Amino acid sequence: MLALALAAITACNTRDNPDEIRRRTAEATESVRRDAKAVAEGVKEGMSRDKKVVNINKASREELLTLPGMTEHEADRIVAERPYDNTEDLVRRHVLPREEYETISDRIIAGH
């Protein structure tokens, strides 16, 4: 988009004065910045909306497998070691390594 705006500016008539070129460049740059910010906000909102929270005390094996990086073996271990007082129990009780826990910690709860 920025390249398109700059190409349009450079294609301007040579009779345009430098102040007019600077003004149009600033407007085009601001427009690109606003558009990029809007796209980033949309992506952020879409990603956060897709984050389903899973209760590790009640979720089925299939629900656990929807978590990022979750293997069948890990899902089976989570089910087998229930109940959990809190999500940190997964690490403390050696059900999941810390690195795996960190990738899903914002998507799990340990409700009863």
Image (cartoon, grey):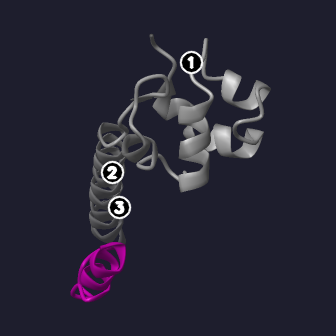
- Give residue 94's quadrant in the image: top right
Question: Which amino acid, by three-letter code, is at mark 3?
Answer: Thr
For the C terminus, the image quarter is top left
Q: CA distance from mark 2 to mark 1?
A: 35 Å
Sequence-wise first label, 2 or 1: 2
User: Closer to us: mark 2 or mark 3?
Assistant: 2
Q: Is residue 80 left or right of residue 23?
A: right
Q: Residue at 67%, 45% (x, y): give it.
A: 100
Residue at x-position 28% and y-position 75%: 5
- Which segment did they paint magenta? 1-17
Residue 104 x %, y %? 56, 39
- Amino acid on which disc 1 is placed: Pro
Of the 4 image quadrants, the one containing the N terminus is bottom left
Question: According to the image, label 3 marks what residue?
Answer: 29
The residue mark sitting in front, 2 or 1, is 1
- Is there a contact, CB below 8 Å, between mark 2 and mark 3? no
